[in-house]
Image (cartoon, rainbow, N blue to C red):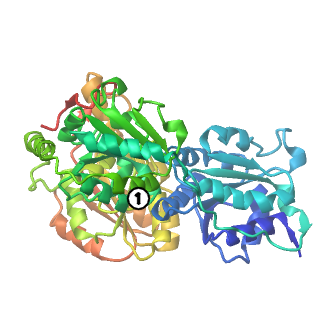
Amino acid sequence: MKLTGAEITIKLLERCGVKVIAGIPGGTNLPLYDSLFNSSIKHILARHEQGAAFIAQGIARSTGKAAVCFATSGPGATNLLTAIADAKLDSVPIIAVTGQVPYSYVGTDSFQEVDIYGLTIPITKHNFFVRSVEELFKVIPEAFRISESGRQGPVLVDIPKNIQNEEFEFEQWPVIENYEEKHEFDNSLVSKAAKIINEAKRPILYIGGGITNSNSGKALYDFAKKNNIPVTSTLMGLGNFPIEDPLFMGMLGMHGARYTNLLLNKADLLLAFGVRFDDRAIGNVNKFCPDAKIIHVDIDDAEIDKIKKSYLSICGNVGTVLNELIPLLEEEKREDWIDYIESIKKEKPMVFPDENDCFHPINIIKTVSKLVRKDTIITTDVGQHQMWTAQAYPINAPRTFLTSGGLGTMGFGLPTAIGAAVANPDKQVVCFSGDGSFLMNIQELATLADLDLNVKIIILNNGHLGLVRQQQQLFYNEHYMASRFSTSPDFAKISEGFGIKGYSIDENSENPLEVLKEVLSNKGSCLINIAIDKFENVFPMVQPGCGISEMIGGE
C-alpha cells in the first residue's frame, strides 16, 4: 500500500489506541489534519495550544494512558512548552506532535521555524525529530512506550512538512505490542526493608504521585493496615488512602495539617514511597525528619538520594515493591505510637472556619462536595483556592483530583477539566479556580461550549493574585505590589458570551445555597463566580526556607 507520511502518522495513532486529539491546525501540520478528515479519531479544536496540551493532560491524568495534542511549527509549538514542562514535573504521559518546516528549510530561519526539538530537551522524557517517512513506523509506537513506561512523562514528535506529504509504499503495518514492564530489583533489599519496618517504633508512610501512577492504592492500604503505619500524602498523592481511616494523617507540607507536619519530626522511620522530596512538601531539607531512617522506593533512580539521603533505597515500581513487602511484615498494633498521634491530632487540629460563615472558601468547597457525586472529578488552578481544595475536599479515590503540583501552572484547571470530561463522559467534573488563574486560559470556554460537557466551574474571586498577596502581607511588610486587580471582569456575563450559563453569588445574594444546589444538580456546563473575602489567607503556612514544623497561622 502507498500512503503519505501524514496518513501513516494518523493510522499509527489509531493503532496505538488514540480516540481523541486536541490541537490547532497551521501551515506545517495541515497534512496531518487533512489525514484526520477520514480518521476515527475525534479532534478537539482548542483555542490556544497550551489549552490543547492541558486537555491532553486531563485525559491522561484521569485515565493513566498517554494522550495526544497537535500544534503547528513556530508559535504553535512554543505555546505547548508550559504544558509539556508541567507534564514532565508531574510525570504525566502526553504525546505532543508538532509540524515543522520542510527539512530543506530547517536552519534557514524560515517562516514559523523554531527548533522545538532543542527547546524541549530539558522538559520532555524523550523527543524525536523525524528525518524520513520510514522512521514514523518506529517513532510513533516508541513515543507511547516511552511515555507510559517507567516514570511516565511527555514525549515530543516533530515532523517536517515534506515528510508528512511524501508518499511511501510498504507491505504491512508494524505490530503494536502490549509491552510488559519488568520491575527487577534486588530482593535482598526487600527483606532488609521489611526487617527495618518491623523493628521501627514510630514509622510514617510518606506517599506521592508514584502511588497513583503505579495503581498501587490497594497494596498501599493493605501494607499500612497490616503493620499499623500512619500515612501522610503529598498534594499529588491525595486520593490513594481513605481520608476517613484513622491511619490517615492528611497532607504534609507548606499548607499541610499542623499535626501532620509536627508528627513527621517525631518519626524514627520514614517510608518514602513514590515521592521526590519536593521542597513544598518537606520544607528545609536539613530540618526534615532529622531523627528518621529513610527507606526510599521510586521507579526513577535519578530521584534516589537526589535531595534527601536514604538509609536504604529500592529503585522499582512502588506497587511491585509493596506487594513483595506485605508477606514479610509482622502484624503490629503500635499502640503507643498510634495513641501519641491521636493526642497530637487533638492538641494541634486542623482548624476550619465556623460553618455559619457560608462564604468562607473552605465552607464553599465543603458545600460543593456534599452536593456532587462521590466519584466527581475535581480539577484546580493554582493558588489559594488550590490549597483550600486540597485541605477541605474529601478526595477519596486516585485520579479524581487533578492539579498542577510541580510546575504550579495558573490556567491549568479549565482545559484539564475539559480533557477529564471528554475521557470520563459518565462523570461530573468540577473545576475550582481563582479570578487570576481563570483569566490565563479563559478562551477555552469556547472549547467547552463546543463540546457541551458536564463541567462546572467555580471561581473563588478575591480580586487578587491571592497567594502572592498573602506572602506580601506576611513576609514583605504588606507591600502589595502588582497583586491586586484594578479591574474585576464580570465572569458570569463573559461566560454567557461564550454560550455557557453564568451565575454570580455574593453575600447579598438570596439563598446562595439553593443556587449552588440547582446549578450543580443540572447537567451541562456552567460557571459560578463567588465573591470571597479579599484578605482571607490559607493557613497553616510554612515560610519558604523554614522547616515544616515551623508553621504560622491555623491555630
Is 206 on the left-hand or right-hand side of 186?
Answer: left
Location of residue 328 in the rendering, given as x and y in whole percent from the top left corner: 34, 52
- Residue 440 position, x and y percent, is 47, 48
User: Dot 1 corresponds to which residue?
Assistant: 216
Residue at 87% x, 48% y is 103
Q: Is residue 36 above or below residue 294?
A: below
Q: Residue at x 66, y 42 (%)?
A: 120
Quadrant of the image containing the N terminus: bottom right
> Would you call the spot at circle 1 few (<14 residues within 10 Å), some (14-19), or many (20 or more)?
many
Question: Amino acid type of disc 1?
Answer: Ser
Q: Nearer the viewer, residue 114 or 449?
A: 114
Closer-to-camera residue (20/481): 20
In percent of the image, x 55 and y 51: which residue is there? 184
- Residue 206 in picture, x, y percent from top left: 33, 44
Residue 543: quarter of image: top left
Which secondary structure, mark 1?
A: loop
Residue 223 vertical placement versus 112 (above, below) = below
Left or right of residue 391: residue 64: right
Quadrant that contains the C terminus: top left
